[in-house]
Amino acid sequence: MTWNNFVAMGDSFTEGMDDSYPDGSYRGWADLVAARLALDAGPEFGYANLAVRGKVLNEVLTEQVGPALGMRPSLVSFAAGGNDILRRKVDPYGLVHKIDPAVEQFRAAGADVILFRFADVTAHLPGQRIVGPRAAALNDGARELAQRHGAILIDLFADDAFRNPLLWSVDRLHLSEAGHRRVAAHVLNALGVGVAEDWLLVPPMPAPSPWLLARGADLRWAGQHFAPWLKRRLAGASSGDLVQAKRPELGPIEAIA
């Protein structure tokens, strides 16, 4: 099947952090998918990416769904809720309930919808006992929504390769270049589109660090990444407060094989 456009919605996962172009802007799995789809669809193919880092689900729903529907997309991706489950108080089942009508709207408009079961990031972060059950509920909800609405489910949680820390960036929360390429490969395979085999390649698993070195790395990570994140949360701020969507309107993207 060939789609004439693709609209991506969500947060940092879809914006493309931390997979950078040479100019320092973010690429990510959605750009890679769009560029591959454009190869089959031709020069008229349009791509928009409305995702902005730090957005919680309510912001994605209120700020991105309307503009996306207005573009009359033939293919959309919806990935949100990850920032919500990191908050102190959240009802993950309530998140799924809010996502349901958005998916229904896109399906009623004739769009194919991509949903995700997110990869397990809890092994790399503090608070696994709190975040883990929330993430599981959100993932289970995505599967139920996909079944109910006939959406395309990308099950990253089932891919054990994402346990490799080299598929994650130094902040332990966002994907690395290799991680984004693997997500793109999963999406393209689910869409029935050919993809280069090297997109699925995984770097060799690094050897375990000695306990003392690992604790030192944890402390450095806490100072460089966790502390600033916590400071923003306490101040009611977001990393995306001054960030605009990188591709707010449908436009061409250079095709890649």
Image (cartoon, rainbow, N blue to C red):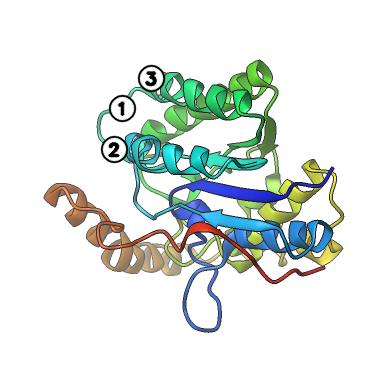
Q: Which residue is mark 3?
A: 94
> In the rendered image, is residue 29 in sight?
yes
* Badge 3 vs badge 1, beta-carbon distance below 8 Å: yes
- Up-down relation of residue 144 to residue 47 (above or below): above
Q: Residues within 10 Å of mark 3 (few under 14, many from 20)?
A: few
* Direction from residue 40 to residue 111 in the image, left or right: left
Write the residue at 63% across / 38% down: 157
- Where on the picture, by quarter, is residue 177? bottom right
Alpha carbons under labels 2 and 3: distance apart: 14 Å
Write the residue at 45% across / 27% down: 133
Residue type, mark 1 in image: Val
* Badge 1 vs badge 2, beta-carbon distance below 8 Å: yes
Can you name the residue that lies furthest to the top here? Answer: 148
Q: Residues within 10 Å of mark 2 (few under 14, many from 20)?
A: few
- Where on the picture, by quarter, is residue 45? bottom right
* Direction from residue 125 to residue 14 in the image, left or right: right
* Direction from residue 60 to residue 90 in the image, left or right: left
Residue type, mark 3 in image: Gly
Task: Give x and y (percent) for residue 129.
Answer: 40, 32
Q: Nearer the viewer, residue 152 or 90?
A: 152
> In the rendered image, is residue 179 in sight?
no
- Up-down relation of residue 227 to residue 163 (above or below): below
> Dot 2: what SS?
loop
- Up-down relation of residue 136 to residue 148 (above or below): below
Residue type, mark 2 in image: Arg
Task: Give x and y (percent) for residue 235.
Answer: 12, 51
Of badges 2 and 3, nearer the viewer stands 3
Query: What is the quadrant of the C terminus in the image?
Result: bottom right
Task: Give x and y (percent) for residue 111.
Answer: 65, 34
